Image (cartoon, rainbow, N blue to C red):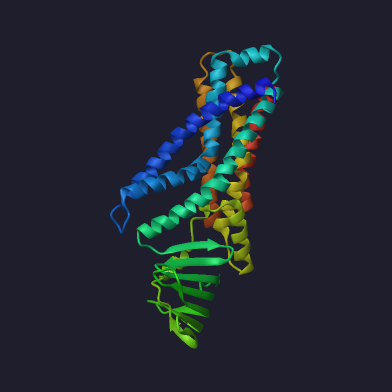
Amino acid sequence: MQRIDWYLLRVIATWFLIILAILVSFRAIGFLVRETGDVGKGDYQLTHVLLLTLMRIPGFIYEIFPAAVLFGGLMGLGGLARNQELMAMRAAGVSIGRLVASLLKTGLILAVGGVFVGEIVAPALEQESEVMRSEWLHQQTILQSEYGVWIRDANTFVNIRRIDPERKISDIAVYTFADDGTLKMMQSATGAKYDGEKWILQGVSELELGEEGNTLVQLSHRELGLDLKMGLLLNLGVDPAFLSMTELFHYISFLHDNEQRSPEYEVVFWSKMVVPVLSILLLLLSLPFVIKDIRNADMGKHLMAGAIIGVLFFLVSKTAGFAGVVYDISPLFVAWTPVLLIAAATAWLYRRLV
């Protein structure tokens, strides 16, 4: 990278980090206020809320990453224009194409950092924070993976490998541990039926482990000693936004293999996939609004117009995600349509500059 590339990267990255810190702070405060309503339930304390808030910050960063890139670009390039540095670059022979190339490099570097935080750091912390929160609130912990649904209630762990479209569950394994962590009993069942109050395991094979030996029992049915309500099965697992793209891909494949629909997970998967592209496009979108009146000292209206357009597109992409789930629209179409619209708008604005 040449000197101009490093200079633009430094200026834009500085403003990006400032804007990101401000937006993340607002998002974290909102989460903190919401969670304080549960303080006092179970063992949930204010210190736990503060810890969970810190653990959620990487997820907040990835959630608002494109918006922070847009505002960082507008503020950084706006500062260069206000100090007449952009005018000096143009007078020195730096073309629009050369500035675009520098912005592409800057956007790529920021996008790589965003993907690292959003796909490696955030999912692990968010999933762990959900487990910790459930334990402090004495709630059941339910996690989804490519190996099925895992439910924890105290010392009992239940693995459900298959849930059909009618919400009938089958291929079930139950593991019960003693307080010292030793395995007491293993149960496997071909299926389970909900009678309105409790789950009844069917086709049960029960192995009880004891110091004097193991006992294997075959039963036609047995009550599942777990207060698992049917409502929980309708919203099984962690929020799909807490999963990385790799985890989402594997889980979507698992659902498809079991003939289950997964529109919500597919929308989240493709939405995560477009974040780096969306961020780079929004950064490129900032240049036309800044350079349009580069000789005009008052560019506030153009900066505001750029911010409004960028935020509107960002809101449209979020709304489209919800609409895709509700109206069963193709997740690929839902995720990429706002990106294509931004790309078209950016191309049109640059064409006006030439």
Going by the picture, which residue comes out furthest to the front?
212
The answer to whether residue 329 of the structure is visible from this angle is no
Identify the image quadrant of the C terminus.
top right
Q: Is residue 183 left or right of residue 12?
A: left
Residue at image coords 38%, 41%: 29
Residue 13, placed above or below residue 274: above
Residue 311 percent location from the top left of the image: 51, 36
Residue at image coords 48%, 74%: 174
324 or 236, nearer to the observer: 236
58 or 93, nearer to the observer: 58
Q: Say which quarter of the image contains residue 340.
A: top right
Residue 183, placed above or below residue 22: below
Residue 67 percent location from the top left of the image: 52, 36
Q: Is residue 34 left or right of residue 254?
A: left
Residue 2 percent location from the top left of the image: 69, 22
Residue at image coords 52%, 75%: 172
Q: Say which quarter of the image contains residue 106.
A: top right
Identify the image quadrant of the N terminus.
top right
Residue 322 percent location from the top left of the image: 51, 51
Q: Is residue 28 left or right of residue 204?
A: left
322 or 100, nearer to the observer: 100
The answer to whether residue 161 of the structure is visible from this angle is yes
Residue 112, placed above or below residue 214: above
62 or 351, nearer to the observer: 62
